[in-house]
Amino acid sequence: MLSITRKLEFDAGHRIPDHRSQCRNLHGHRYVLEITLEGELVDVEGAPDRGMVMDFADVKSLANTHLVDLWDHAFLVFEGDTQVRDFLATMPGHKTVVLDRIPTVENLALAAFGILSKVYDQHYGVDLRLKRVRLYETPNCWADAERA
C-alpha cells in the first residue's frame, strides 16, 4: 500500500462565536489543505495513470470541485450563529457556507474528510481511499482528520 499527498490552498472567513479571545470576531485565514490518499499502483497497460496511486491533477480537480471552490473566498458560518448569518444575508450574492458545526479548524477538517471520503474512496485507482485530511489554519496550527 502506498500513500500520496496533494496540497491545495484557499482563503475563507469565519468566527468562533464563544471564543474568549479575538477569534470571536469576523476574520479570515489562508487555509492549506493536504489530502492524503492510499492505495495500490495502477498497473493497466495504456492507462494514463499507470504507475500511480492517482494522478495528482485528478486529486486536485476532484478536491476543487467538491470542496475548495465551494469554500474559497467564502464565509464559513455555524448555522447556530444567527447574528452573523442574518448579517451576511443582508449582502446580496455574498458567498456564505452554512455549516452544522462551529467552524474551528478541527471541525472544518472533519467536514472536509467527510466530503472528500465520499469522492475518493473506491471510485478511482486500485483500492484507493482517503487516509487523512490535514487542514492548516495558520502555518503553525493545524488539525488532522484520519481514517481509524
Image: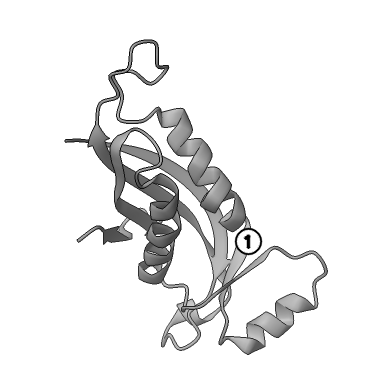
Dot 1 crowding, Cα within 10 Å, few <14, some 14–19, many 20+: some
Label 1 element class: strand
Q: From the viewer's perspective, is 42 left or right of 112?
A: left
Q: From the viewer's perspective, is 120 left or right of 87?
A: left
Which residue sits furthest top?
46
Which amino acid is tagged 1? Ala
Q: Which x, y percent locates residue 94?
A: 75, 65
Front one among 29 and 54: 54
With respect to residue 41, does 101 lie above or below? below
Q: Residue at x 43, y 65 (%)?
A: 111
| Residue 97 sits in quarter | bottom right
Q: Which x, y percent locates residue 63?
A: 49, 45
Picture quarter with the C terminus? bottom left
With respect to residue 75, does 79 lie above or below? below
Q: How is the image coloured?
A: one colour
Q: Which x, y percent locates residue 84?
A: 65, 82
Which residue sits furthest right?
92
| Residue 43 sits in quarter | top left
Front one among 48 and 112: 48
Q: From the viewer's perspective, is 86 left or right of 68?
A: right
- Identify residue for label 1: 74
Q: Which x, y percent locates residue 54?
A: 36, 30
With respect to residue 24, does 43 lie above or below? above
Q: Residue at x 41, y 50 (%)?
A: 33
Q: How many marks?
A: 1
Q: From the viewer's perspective, is 79 left or right of 7?
A: right
With respect to residue 37, does 99 lie above or below? below
Picture quarter with the N terminus? top left
